[in-house]
Every structure is written in C-alpha cells, then in structure tokens.
C-alpha cells in the first residue's frame, strides 16, 4: 500500500500548522487518495500509474497549502473569534460571554448539575447572611440612625445586683438618672437634640391586658418618655406619637399602637384615632399608629403599644415594684429603663460622652453607694444605629457557627464543580489546543474559561437567591419559635444581601474556575491531540488536582457531619434529661392580676382562692403556684446569700430564688429529703421560711443538718429579713433547659404580699392535660372575668418550645451534613467514573496481560477508598481543632466524643464504598478487545 | 446584487452549493462527495483533493457543515460531513437564488431566440 502521508505532510509544511491539525488533515486526505488509488486499480491501471494519478490530485507542491491557508488561518469570518485578540475590551468580554453561553448550552447535563450544586451552596450562604443582616447589621428604620447613641455603663469589679440583667455592663438606668441626663442635655443644647427613655411593661411578651370593647386581651407594651418618637425620627402613619405633654401628671392618657397591632386587632380601622381602650383596667385613648416598618428600638421584639411614663401600681416598667418605696420615679438605684439620644450634626460620640460622664459619676457616687471610688462604673455612649442589642447577644454565636457551616458547604460545592470542570477540561483539550495552535494567547484563553465558570456561578447565584428567599423565611420562623415566638424580623432581600450574593458568586466562579483554567490552558498540545492514552503512570499525575479536591470535600463533609452528630446528640440528651420534676400530665398558665388592680393581701387572697377552686375541679389531681414558669427562661437570681454565723464571702455566693405555692414539691414531683415543703400555714403572719435544695446545703452547710439555720438575701446577714430553713429538696432545674448547678431556694408566695406580681399555676391532671383546659378557664373567669390566662399550655409543650433552639441547630446541621455528604459522594463518583473512562485503554492492557476482573475492581475501589480515608483523616484532625468552638452549644456529650467521630467515619466510608462500586464494576466489565482499540 | 464575480469565485460559490445539497440528504465523506459531483455532472465538474478539502473545512468553519470521525468495524476511520441547521437555511436560500437566476436566464434566452 502506498504511503500517502509523507507526500501530504510535505505539502502542508509551509502552513506551520500544529502537529495535531496536520495529522488530522493528512489522515483525511490520505484516505481519499487511497480510495482513488483503489478505484484506479479496479479500472485496470498499474500500481505505478494509479499512484501517480492519485498524487496528481494534490495538484503540485503548493496548491494544497495555498488553498488551505486562508481557511486554516481563519481569515474568513468566523462565527466566534477564537482568541486572536480583540481590539475592544468590552466587545471581547461580550464575545466571551456569548461563547460561554454556547459552551454551557452544549452540555446541558453538566451545566445543570454544576449550576444546581452552586445554587445550593450560594443559596445557603445567602440565607444565613440575610438573617445576620436582619439581626446584626441592619440599622433601625428611622431617620439618620447613625446619629443615635445608646447610654451604657460598664464596671470591672462591682456589678450592682439590681441591674435588670445582672451583667457587668448594662444599658439600664433609673428614672432619676434619666432626669439628670435630660437636664444636662437641656443645659448643653449643643450636644444632643433629644434624650429619651423606654422600658417594657413586663418581662415576657403579653405583658399588658388590653380591654377592647370590654373583652380582655393580651398585648406587648412599652413605656416611653416624651421625646421617644421625635428623637428617633419616626413619623406616625396616623395621628401623633407620645409627646412631653403626655408625661404631665393628670394629662389625658395617650396610647400609640403599632401597625401590626392595628392590623391584627382593629383590622386597620381608619377611624382608630380617638378610640378608647383600657390598659390593665385604666382607660386610654389611641392617639397614633406607627408606620409599617417601625419595630421599636430592639431587633426581634416589637411592642404592640407605647404609653407615656406613668407610675401606677397597675402599670410599671417590667411589671415590678422596686424594693423600698413604691415609686419608680424616686427609686434612685432601681435601674429599670434604657436611654437613647440623638447627637446633633457635627457632634461626635466621644464629645457627648465626655460631657455626660461627670454627671453620671456624681449621680452614682451619691445614689448607688459604691464601696470604693475605683468601683464606680464608667459611662459610655455606644452607637445606637442598630438599637438595643437584645437578640444579638444570644443568637450571635449560633448564627456565626451556621455561617461557618454553610461556608464549608459552599467550599464543598465549589470543589465539586471544580472537579467537574477539571474532568471536562480534559475532554476539551482538543478544542483548546486548536485554539492555542491558531494563535490564541494563554491569558485570553484563561479569560474565556473564567468567563464560563463565572457565568455558571452567576446562574447558580441567581438560582441560589430564589432558594435563599424561601429558606430565609423558614429560618426566621424557626429562630422565632426558638425565641418563644416573639421575633419579628424583616429578613428581606435588600441591597446588602444582593451585593453579598453577587460577591460570593463572583469569588466562587473565579475560585473553582481558575485552577482548571490554568491547567487546561497549559495543555500539552501533542499529547492532547493523541487520543491514545498509553502510559499508565501519566494518569496518576494528571489526576492529582482532582484527587486533592475529593480529599477536601470528604474532609469538609466530616466536619459538618460530626457537628451535626454532636447537635443531634445534644438534642436527644436534652429531651431525655431528667430535670428533677415530673413533667407528665402537667400544665401551666399565668395570671397577672396586678394589671387589674390586685395588690397586697387582695392579690394573695385571689391566688389562694383560685388554688382552692382549681384543686377541686374534676380531672385535677393537684395544683400549686410558681413565680416563673419552668423553662420560660426567667428566674430570680440573687447574687448575695449570707448565712447566719457564716464567714463565707457574700459576693461569691448566689442562688436562684422562687416564690411558690403550698404543696409545690408534691405537685411537681420533687422529693423532699429533709424537713417539710411550703405549706398553707406559711402566711404573711407567720415567720419567714424557706426550703432549699441539696446543692444549697452542700455549699453552705456541708456535712451539717441545715434545718433551723437562717440566711438572708443580702451582702451582709440581716436578721430582720432572714429566712429559716424548714426543708431540703432534691435539686430540680426549673429555669433553663441548659441546666447549671446553682443552689436554689423556695419561699411561700403568701409571705410577700407587697412584692408579689405575676404567678404561674402548675396543675397536674389525672389524664391528658388538654382535657381540663376549658374547666380551668371557667374557674378563672368565675373568679374574675377581666383576667386573661397567659400562655396556657402543657408543660410538655413548654419544654419542647424551650428546646426549639437546640432542635433548630440539630436540624440545620443535619441538613448541611447530609447535603455535604451527598455532594462529596457525587464528586467521588464522578472523579472515579471519569478516571475509569480515561483508563479504559490501560485496563484493557492489564486484562489482556492477565489481570482478572476482580483485580481491576480492587484497583478502582482502592483508589476511591484511599482518597476517602485520607479525607476522613484530614476531616477528623480539622474537627478536633474546631469542636471546642461549639462546646458551649452542646450538652451531655464531649466535643471529642469518640462514638460520634467513629460513627461519622464509618458512615462516610460505607457510602464512599457504594459510590466507588459503580465505576469499579464498570471497569471490571471492560472488554479488553474493545478497550485496546479505544482511542 | 451588483457584483462582478470572478470565475473562481463563481465556481467556488456554486461548488459550496453543490456540496451542501449533496450532504443534505445524508452524511457523506469527502471521497464520496467528489465522486457524486463527478458522476451527477456527467464529468463536467470535478474537484481535486487540493480544492475539495479546503472547501469542506471552510464550510465547517462557517458552521454550515459539521464533520465527525466515524469508525466502522473492520475499516479505517473516515470523516463524515453533515449539514447543520444553519447550513440548511443557507442551502434553501441559495437554491431559491439559483432558481430565480436560471429562470431569468431562461426568460431572456427564450425571448431572444423566439
């Protein structure tokens, strides 16, 4: 058979084509000449003649090259410029985008998988960021929030125990202090244009009883001073806000309601202004409605109504009365309100802070009675653009943890897509080589490839925004439930969120696109043109980047799965935890009779009578009272306990203290180990007694019998206000689902008529608690129809709600962990499947040389499992370093819990084995004869 | 269209048209195309290798043809060409053009010779 190729190649030489292209043309033309040659032989020509005739088709030495030159040099108009440099940068970008779109359309399967993967990763990040934005980053929806300041004090050594939060740094001040600050501001008009104060009307939501057309309902209320609305710069939607005039004693009682409340209760009645309602029995007139986007000054909480500062027994900040006198206005060390101010233009926080510091210093010295000069807290003006940080404090850590988790998920998604791109880059080598051959510059090529990946991630980002929108709302609902359902957040997609998503998408596109682009553009042209993949050792080198990506994905999945495992176990531990009291068939509801004018002895009598009524109801086994509903999160914590005759340092002591009803311990199922419980005979007329728990006795009376001993709740033992210990009980956790080991004490509610307020009833039913709901309601109604029941629910529901946060964390991390596992396994499967395809020729050789199918199976499985195990090892090491960061959020399980680690490693390995098995089986089934011919 | 078409261009233009129409029916390789053109024109039109393949590559670059290597068992692989959607559109318009041209010629010559 004649050799046509040398003749053809010689003629192609002057074109200086890439060897790949030359070879291709030569092969095609050679085939044509061979066909012609055979045809001529058939007609009877001799071999020589036939050869010469066929060669003549090439028309001399340079005819072929001349005809080919314009085509191969691309001098004809191409549909797409192939990287030969464009004069206009933007035209070049547009070309790149158009070309990229075409390339993406050409492989719809690949594009959909990549875009979806990215959408999940980007979407999850956007959702979490939306929440962060809503809770932590957003400013108050008021005029010029950057001029607002929040009054704050901070102390290293001496936290006054009467601060509302008990922390060392606080935003609470007393009314007298507020008056001092206001006077200062009036005197120094050049610093602040307004100073205003506010306080909620109770500890919990539903802190106010609102009588609408005679029917009692519950709402969340706040007290504010006259410059609150004007200082914030809030223009009411209807009517007006609270003004200074409303604070004057004897002024008609003005009420401002929120937009949401107006919608919920009054169906947006346009004639709402001037309507009369009662608040805790006192008549008020509605004078204004706030705009729809105003939620007060603390993110996540939104009052339904605002009133002017008023000191009535029915209506007090925090529904509480201070210790000594009854007036919130005169108690100088009762820190019940928060203060904000608006700086004038050009005034800095530091300037204003300096001006007010002296006044604060003076006030504290005179009124808080600090032990030493150096103990006096210092005064701070904190930035107030985001309002009062309440929700931020306890949601910050979990939210940042979630941010890390979704960040890991995104990393896995990127690694996955990068793996896909690397595989595709290999199959696009020919295309890229051709383009390089005809003159495309490497940088231009990289730009083109990056455009494709950025376009993919942009599409993923858009889709991710849609995912995020849906999931953010769900996330907010979950967080809100975990916060006792009181959180109102506007986590809509604002420009910050959009910018974040855009940024992430761009970074992600460049991140996962760069490495494959660099690799692909470096294509070895000669070997790229050869489909023949011969050398075995070559392959391992080529797959290194793909392999390390798999290891990264597996490692990140391990981290997420272990975190999920720890949170799931935490939730289980909480759910199984014995809190020390019997929760079966127990229900709870609260009453706030002080709002209806009950005080002192009348209040005590009301509770006693109600207890009597309820205890005889059919279906009720027992009933008692407790000051704070279990797991409501609220408790009275006293930081000072002084035992009679004991030298213990009072500042190091502290206990949880509750007023309870008679038969409390028997009703709640808390065993009494010594002495007795609280009884009916413990009244205001009898000596003050207390029941303490074993933690208390271990701390204050180790090895002794505590019965008969006395203690007082003050920094120095005060016999006049002391309690005799009459009983000891087993420790029970009644405050928080996060149990701590605190000493606890219980006293009789009847012995504190003056300071008694809201109480909760604990009722143990004979059967399912829900069956006696209506009877309880009737019993209360019969006693007083104006008293609404607060939060009537079973104890089981209360506990479950208290665990909502843990449940949220467990759910979210589990979802992320599973997603991560899925993505990593898809990546593993894809990499191996592609490796098998590439290695088909090698496999064929091996099998032809005697390798058994099981050897091949083993070879592929080994590669996959090795990668997985390396990934697991890296992941475990990474997790060991990281879990102590979440140790404060887990319970009952160590952050290095071996069971969780081993289980995750095992699950991952098994799933990985399955993922490897399919490509391994395919490898095993390779027919050596076909494989050897495979090019 | 007011344009002087050189003979080479005229031939090239019509050649492309011929190739497209031959490949429209089914994919063919280069040798098959050249044989068909020779046969169906009764030997009046012949394309040598040095002219045919540059033409095929040009059509491919324009996106009117798509070439693919095909391997059949027992044979060496060959490059087959099929017409693309864009190619079909071009072919249809060229066919219309040719028909109008031929009809025009026909009308003129009939009139002259009548």
Image: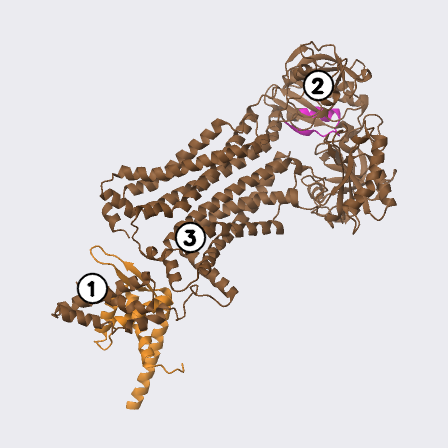
Vertical placement of residue A84 versus A477, above or below: below
Q: Colour of chain B?
A: orange
- The residue identified by callout 3 is A519
How far separated are the C-alphas under marks 2 and 1?
A: 105 Å
Indicate whether residue A787 is drawn in magenta: yes
Which is more foreground, mark 3 or mark 2? Answer: 3
Colour brown, chain? A
In the picture, measured across the screen, residue A522 lies left or right of residue A223, that is left
Which disc, if any, is residue A3? Answer: 1
* Magenta residues (range): A776-793
The tag earlier along the polypeptide, 3 or 1, is: 1
Q: How is the image coloured?
A: by chain
Crowd rating for badge 3 (residues with CA inside 10 Å; few <14, some 14–19, many 20+): some
Q: Position of residue A290 (x, y in %)?
A: 74, 46
Task: Indicate the secondary structure of the residue bearing disc 1.
Answer: loop
The Cα–Cα distance between marks 3 and 1, rounded to whole angstroms, is 37 Å
Q: Residues within 10 Å of mark 1 (few under 14, many from 20)?
A: few
Which of marks 2 and 3 precedes in the sequence? 3
Residue A745: numbered disc:
2
């Amino acid at each position: 058979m004649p050799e046509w190729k040398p003749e053809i190649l010689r003629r192609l030489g002057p074109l200086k084509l890439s060897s790949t292209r030359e070879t291709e043309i030569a092969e095609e033309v050679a085939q044509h000449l061979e066909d012609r040659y055979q045809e001529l032989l058939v007609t009877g020509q001799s071999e020589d003649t036939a050869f010469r005739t066929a060669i003549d088709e090439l028309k001399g030495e340079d005819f072929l090259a001349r005809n080919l030159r314009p085509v191969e040099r691309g001098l004809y108009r191409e549909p797409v410029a192939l990287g030969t440099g464009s004069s206009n940068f933007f035209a070049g970008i547009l070309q790149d985008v158009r070309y990229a779109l075409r390339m993406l359309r050409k492989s719809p399967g690949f594009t959909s998988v990549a875009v979806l993967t990215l959408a999940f990763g980007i979407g999850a990040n956007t959702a979490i960021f939306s929440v962060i934005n809503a809770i932590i980053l957003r400013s108050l929806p008021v005029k010029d929030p950057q001029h607002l300041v929040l009054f704050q004090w901070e102390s290293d050594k001496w936290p006054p125990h009467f601060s509302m939060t008990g922390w060392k740094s606080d935003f609470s001040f007393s009314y007298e202090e507020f008056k001092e600050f206001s006077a200062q501001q009036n005197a120094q008009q050049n610093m602040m244009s307004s100073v205003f104060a506010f306080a909620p009307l109770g500890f919990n939501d539903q802190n106010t009883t609102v009588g609408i057309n005679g029917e009692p309902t519950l709402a969340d209320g706040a007290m504010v001073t006259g410059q609150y609305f004007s200082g914030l710069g809030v223009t009411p939607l209807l009517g007006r806000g609270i003004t200074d005039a409303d604070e004057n004693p004897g002024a008609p009682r003005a009420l401002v309601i929120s937009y949401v409340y107006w919608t919920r209760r009054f169906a947006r009645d346009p004639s709402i202004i001037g309507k009369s309602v009662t608040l805790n029995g006192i008549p008020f007139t509605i004078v204004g409605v706030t705009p729809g986007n105003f939620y007060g000054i603390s993110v996540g909480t939104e009052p339904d109504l605002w009133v002017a500062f008023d000191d009535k027994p029915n209506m007090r900040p925090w529904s509480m009365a201070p210790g000594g006198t009854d007036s919130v206005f005169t108690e100088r060390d009762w820190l019940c309100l928060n203060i904000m101010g608006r700086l004038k233009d050009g005034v800095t926080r530091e300037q204003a802070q300096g001006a007010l510091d002296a006044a604060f210093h003076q006030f504290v010295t005179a009124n808080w009675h600090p032990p030493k000069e150096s103990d006096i807290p210092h005064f701070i003006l904190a930035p107030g653009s985001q309002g009062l940080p309440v929700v931020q404090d306890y949601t910050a850590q979990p939210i940042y943890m979630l941010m890390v988790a979704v960040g890991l998920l995104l990393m896995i998604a990127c690694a996955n897509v990068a793996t896909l791109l690397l595989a595709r880059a290999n199959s696009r080598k020919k295309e890229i080589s051709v383009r390089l051959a005809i003159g495309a510059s490497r940088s231009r090529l990289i730009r083109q490839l990056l455009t494709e990946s950025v376009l993919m991630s942009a599409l993923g980002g858009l889709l991710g925004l849609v995912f995020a929108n849906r999931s953010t709302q769900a996330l907010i609902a979950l967080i809100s439930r975990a916060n006792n359902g009181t959180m109102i957040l506007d986590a809509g997609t604002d420009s910050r969120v959009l910018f974040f998503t855009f940024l992430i998408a761009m970074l992600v596109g460049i991140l996962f696109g760069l490495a494959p682009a660099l690799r692909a553009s470096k294509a070895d042209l000669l070997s790229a043109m050869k489909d023949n993949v011969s050398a075995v050792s070559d392959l391992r080198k080529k797959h290194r980047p793909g392999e390390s990506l798999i290891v990264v994905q597996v490692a990140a999945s391990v981290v997420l799965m272990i975190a999920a495992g720890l949170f799931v176990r935490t939730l289980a531990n909480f759910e199984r935890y014995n809190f020390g009291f019997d929760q079966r068939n127990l229900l709870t509801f609260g009453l706030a009779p002080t709002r209806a004018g009950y005080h002192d002895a009348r209040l005590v009598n009301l509770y006693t009578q109600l207890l009597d009524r309820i205890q005889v109801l059919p279906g009720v086994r027992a009933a008692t009272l407790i000051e704070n509903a279990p797991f409501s999160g609220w408790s009275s914590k006293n930081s000072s306990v002084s035992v009679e005759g004991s030298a213990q340092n009072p500042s190091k002591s502290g206990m949880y203290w509750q007023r309870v009803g008679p038969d409390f311990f028997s009703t709640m199922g808390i065993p009494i180990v010594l002495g007795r419980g609280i009884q009916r005979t413990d009244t205001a007329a009898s000596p003050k007694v207390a029941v303490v728990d074993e933690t208390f006795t271990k701390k204050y009376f180790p090895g002794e019998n505590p019965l008969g001993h006395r203690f007082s709740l003050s920094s120095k033992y005060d016999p006049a206000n002391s309690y005799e210990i009459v009983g000891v009980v087993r420790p029970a956790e009644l405050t928080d689902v996060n149990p701590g080991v605190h000493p606890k004490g219980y006293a009789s509610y009847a012995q504190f008529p003056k300071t008694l307020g809201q109480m909760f009833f604990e009722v143990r039913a004979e059967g399912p608690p829900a069956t006696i709901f209506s009877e309880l309601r009737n019993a209360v109604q019969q006693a007083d129809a104006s008293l609404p029941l607060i939060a009537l629910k079973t104890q089981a529901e209360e506990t479950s709600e208290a665990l909502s946060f843990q449940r949220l964390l467990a759910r979210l991390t589990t979802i992320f962990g599973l997603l991560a596992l899925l993505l990593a396994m898809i990546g593993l499967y894809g990499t191996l499947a592609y490796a098998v395809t590439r290695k088909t020729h090698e496999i064929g050789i091996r099998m032809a040389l005697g390798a058994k199918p099981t050897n091949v199976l083993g070879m592929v499985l080994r590669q996959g499992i090795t990668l997985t195990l390396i990934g697991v090892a890296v992941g475990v090491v990474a997790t060991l370093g990281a879990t102590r960061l979440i140790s404060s959020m887990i319970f009952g399980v160590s952050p290095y819990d071996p069971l969780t680690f081993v289980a995750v490693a095992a699950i991952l390995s098994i799933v990985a084995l399955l993922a490897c098995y399919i490509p391994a089986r395919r490898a095993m089934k390779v027919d050596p004869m076909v494989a050897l011919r495979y090019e | 269209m007011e344009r002087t078409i050189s003979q080479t261009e005229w031939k090239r233009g019509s050649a492309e048209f011929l190739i497209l129409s031959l490949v429209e029916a089914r994919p063919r390789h280069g040798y098959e195309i050249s044989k068909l053109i020779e046969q169906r024109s009764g030997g009046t039109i012949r394309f040598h290798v040095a002219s045919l393949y540059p033409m095929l590559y040009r059509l491919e670059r324009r996106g009117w043809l798509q070439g693919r290597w095909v391997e059949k068992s027992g044979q060496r692989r060959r490059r087959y060409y099929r017409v693309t959607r864009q190619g079909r559109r071009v072919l249809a318009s060229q066919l219309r053009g040719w028909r109008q041209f031929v009809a025009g010629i026909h009308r003129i010559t009939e009139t002259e010779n009548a």
